[in-house]
Structures are given as structure tokens and as C-alpha cells.
Image (cartoon, helix red, strand yellow):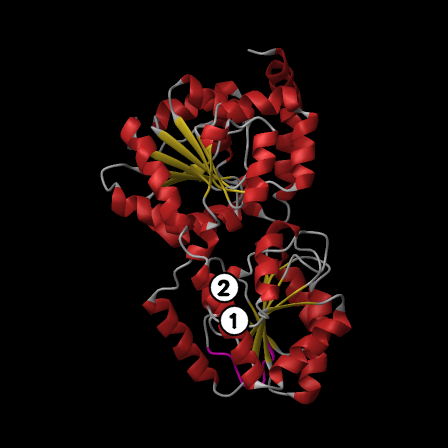
């Protein structure tokens, strides 16, 4: 084992007790972190069909991005079993909601040789597809040792992350050279991967498969039926919010209700461990609300619907007239703006968008996305949009065109995967 990776592995072993303590600490608020801990050590008892494709999507966002790819792989290679791994319970729940028993799902093992050997001995994949930039040196090396091809799909690499990898070049460069194919989202990402040591022949610019989102006729019909039940109420959604944003959103909603008393806010926290805390915050603001988990129609006097269920965000977006995308009013980097864009919704975000900078720029240039600085600006943006159905329609159609005009990354990625599978 090269000295740099030996040091990395030794440090990981030393930190393992701390990692486990952090896992248990997180389980205080999110009990799901306490479940299935053995899977993180490559231990699971479920029967596995070996010799297929392993797709790793760290959490919710990557799982959503991977969904069209996984469905396409199931159609293309029905004889190959698919294993999907995540690192978070929210990602796990999304896998189960999207695919049920059609894929085998467990948590990914920690990036240590002993756990990886156990995991790979179970599933024996012929191909690993890693979504975006979840790079683990021992995982990639273990696959290379066993002749398992590795594809980094929908790959993105910010300048900040590239600088971090550059400081750890002794570990990063050999790891990147063992990746069979890097399918980067854009030329800037590709250039950063090349600078870190990815061979030119192993790089392709595919675009973002997030543009290849499919809503489905059944989902569209269900959302329309819900909107019909709600009648003429104006509805806006705050999607994937984090601590520090909900207060701002509720203040904006209070301002909106001064002009539109029946307006409804769908508030969807990013993490399930925050559901109860956000419910208390709504109560503190004296706003009548309902929980989505109650599974009943929204009463006329309810002005907030708390989205406290898993796997329903895409559906709830379809029930709204305007979308605010969270993780952007705090220094979190924002979340996926293409889901509301696919529904043809005008979009509002905060200033923190480094996770989706290129996509945000596209939507903003098209006139589909508005960036706000604070609570007052958010309230005014929502009020202005609710005042004009024509403006909402214009911006929503612009958002939908951005999605439609940038589709095609999935087919490019599948072409690369087809070639790799044919060779293996």
C-alpha cells in the first residue's frame, strides 16, 4: 500500500470510534441513524444477487439525480441486479420510495479495506457508478484491484473542493487515475479533474443528468387533483429548508397573508429530525397548520402544510404556484432547482448556490429564477409573483424550457456505460 494511502487508512481506523460516537449522537434527533449500523461495516444478512451494477448515491440529492439512470439501467440490463447504497437515512428512505424491492439497498461500508472486502465479497459488482463527487480512496482502489470498473457520473468539482484535493495530491492523484471514466457536468468541472490527475482519455463532458428528470403522467395527475381540491388558494412551497431559514420563510408568509389571507405555504424541512422543531416554530408564530403525515385534506383555515413525510417533495412541488428552494439563505450551497423548474414553477433562492451555480446561472439568465438576500426581499418576491398570474406563467415556462433544452446528459452517460459493460 502506498505510504499516503497507508497514512489515510491508519488515520481512518484511529478515528473510527469518533465516527461511531458521532453516528450515535446524530441518532438522538434522528433515530434512523441507530438502525442497520452493521451495514456500515459491510455486514448484512439479506440475500444478494451478485455480479451486477453498484450505484452509490450519498444522500437525497444524489439519489434523485441517480433515479433516471437507475431506471434506464433496469430497462437496458434487466439481467443485471442493481445494488444502490447511500450514507444517510434520508437517502435510504428515498431509495426505498423510488424503487422498492426492484433494487438491493444497504448503507455503503466505511472506506476501510476490511469492511470493503466483506461488502464486495457479497455483491461482486462488475461496475461501480458513483454519483457526483463521493470519492473514497480505498473504495476505488479495492474496485481497481478486483477489476471492477468505476464511473464517476454527473461529476462536479468546485474550485474549493479542487483546492482541497490538490493539498492531498499524494492520495487524490492515484485514486483519480484508477477511475475508469469521469463524466463531468461541464467543461470547468472537467478541467479541474484533469488538473488533479485524471487522464484525458478517461474524461468526458456529459452535462448534468439532473436535467433528465421525468415527472410521469400519474404524478402530474395526482398533483392536479390535489390542486383542484384546494380550489383557488395561492400556494407557495419552501423546499428542503434548513435551520435558520424557516423563521425567515414564516415571516414572509405572514406578510403574504396580509394581501392574500387564504394563501397556503407548504414548508418541507430537508431533514426529518427537524420536523417537530419546525412544527413548534409554526405554532410559535400562531399560524394554523397541518402535518402532511396526517394524510387528510388541508382545511380552509390551515395556512401552513408541514411536509413531514419522506419521498413526497416532487409531488408537493407539483401542487404549488411558486417555489423557494432552501439551503440557500444560509451558507449551505443550495439544493436542486431543476425539480421546480420541471414543473414549470417560478423559482426563488437565496444567495448561497455553490452546489448548483451553473444551473442557477442558466435559470437566472432565462428569467426563471430570482435571488433574494433576506426575509424582506423574500416576502416581496413572493408577494410580487402572487400578484400576477401572467408573470408566474412567463417565468415558469422559462424554467421548463431550461430543463427541456438541456436534456441529453443521460444518453451520453449511458453510451459510456454501455461501452464499459461490453468490455467487462
Which residue is at 38% across, 25% downward? Answer: 148
Residue 405 lies, in percent from the top left, at 45, 61
Q: Is residue 236 above or below residue 1?
A: below
Q: Is residue 383 above or below residue 71?
A: below
Which residue is at 62% across, 31% downward? Answer: 20
Residue 176 lies, in percent from the top left, at 53, 27
Q: Quadrant of the N terminus?
A: top right
Q: Which residues are magenta?
A: 297-304
Crowd around label 1: few <14 · some 14–19 · many ≥20 (10 Å)? many
Q: Looking at the image, can residue 390 be seen?
A: yes
Q: Nearer the viewer, residue 70 or 263?
A: 70
* Secondary structure beneath label 2: helix
* Secondary structure beneath label 1: helix
Dominant secondary structure of the residues highlighted in magenta in the image: loop
Q: Quadrant location of residue 163?
A: top right
Which residue is at 42% across, 56% downward? Answer: 407
Is 421 on the left or on the right of 79, as rendered? right
| Residue at the extreme left | 79
Q: Nearer the viewer, residue 164 or 252?
A: 164
Crowd around label 2: few <14 · some 14–19 · many ≥20 (10 Å)? many
The answer to if 41 sits in the magenta stretch is no
Say if mark 2 contacts mark 1, CB within 8 Å.
Answer: yes
- Which residue does the numbered mark 2 point to in the structure image? 402
Q: Nearer the viewer, residue 154 or 309?
A: 154
Count of marks placed on residues: 2
Is 17 on the left or on the right of 115, as rendered? right
Q: Quadrant of the C terminus?
A: top left
Q: Is residue 309 above or below residue 16?
A: below
Q: Looking at the image, can residue 285 be seen?
A: no
- Which residue does the numbered mark 1 point to in the structure image? 398
Residue 52 lies, in percent from the top left, at 31, 33
How far is the residue under mark 2 from the one under mark 1?
6 Å
Amino acid at each position: 500500500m502506498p505510504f499516503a494511502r497507508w497514512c489515510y487508512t491508519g488515520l481512518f481506523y484511529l478515528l473510527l470510534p469518533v465516527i461511531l460516537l458521532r453516528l450515535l449522537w446524530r441518532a438522538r434527533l434522528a433515530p434512523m441513524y441507530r438502525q442497520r449500523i452493521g451495514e456500515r461495516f459491510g455486514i448484512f444478512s439479506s440475500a444478494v444477487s451478485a455480479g451486477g451494477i453498484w450505484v452509490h448515491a450519498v444522500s437525497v440529492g444524489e439519489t434523485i439525480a441517480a433515479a433516471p439512470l437507475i431506471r434506464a439501467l433496469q430497462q437496458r440490463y434487466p439481467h443485471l441486479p442493481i445494488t444502490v447504497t447511500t450514507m444517510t437515512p434520508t437517502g435510504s428512505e428515498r431509495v426505498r420510495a423510488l424503487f422498492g424491492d426492484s433494487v438491493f439497498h444497504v448503507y455503503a461500508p466505511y472506506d476501510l479495506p476490511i469492511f470493503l472486502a466483506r461488502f464486495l465479497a457479497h455483491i461482486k459488482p462488475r461496475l461501480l457508478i458513483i454519483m457526483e463527487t463521493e470519492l473514497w480512496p480505498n473504495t476505488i482502489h479495492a474496485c481497481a484491484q478486483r477489476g471492477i470498473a468505476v464511473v464517476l457520473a454527473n461529476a462536479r468539482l468546485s474550485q474549493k473542493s479542487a483546492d482541497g484535493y490538490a493539498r492531498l495530491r499524494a492520495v487524490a492523484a492515484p485514486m483519480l487515475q484508477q477511475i475508469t471514466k469521469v463524466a463531468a457536468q461541464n467543461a470547468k468541472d472537467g478541467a479541474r479533474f484533469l488538473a488533479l490527475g485524471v487522464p484525458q482519455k478517461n474524461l468526458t463532458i456529459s452535462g448534468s443528468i439532473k436535467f433528465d428528470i421525468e415527472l410521469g403522467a400519474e404524478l402530474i395527475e395526482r398533483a392536479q387533483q390535489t390542486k383542484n381540491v384546494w380550489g383557488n388558494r395561492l400556494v407557495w412551497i419552501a423546499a428542503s429548508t434548513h435551520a435558520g431559514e424557516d423563521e425567515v420563510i414564516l415571516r414572509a408568509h405572514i406578510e403574504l397573508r396580509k394581501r392574500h389571507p387564504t394563501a397556503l405555504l407548504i414548508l418541507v424541512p430537508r431533514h426529518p429530525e427537524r420536523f417537530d422543531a419546525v412544527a413548534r416554530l409554526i405554532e410559535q408564530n400562531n399560524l394554523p397548520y397541518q402535518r402532511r403525515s396526517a394524510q387528510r385534506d388541508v382545511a380552509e383555515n390551515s395556512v401552513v402544510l408541514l411536509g413531514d413525510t419522506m419521498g413526497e417533495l416532487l409531488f408537493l412541488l407539483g401542487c404549488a404556484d411558486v417555489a423557494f428552494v432552501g439551503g440557500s439563505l444560509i451558507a449551505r450551497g443550495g439544493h436542486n432547482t431543476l425539480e421546480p423548474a420541471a414543473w414549470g414553477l417560478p423559482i426563488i433562492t437565496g444567495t448561497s448556490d455553490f452546489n448548483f451555480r451553473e444551473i442557477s446561472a442558466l435559470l437566472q439568465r432565462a428569467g426563471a429564477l430570482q435571488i433574494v438576500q433576506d426575509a424582506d426581499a423574500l416576502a416581496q418576491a413572493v408577494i410580487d409573483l402572487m400578484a400576477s398570474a401572467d408573470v408566474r406563467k412567463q417565468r415558469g415556462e422559462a424554467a421548463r424550457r431550461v430543463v427541456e433544452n438541456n436534456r441529453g446528459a443521460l444518453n451520453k452517460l449511458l453510451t459510456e456505460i454501455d461501452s464499459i459493460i461490453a468490455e467487462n
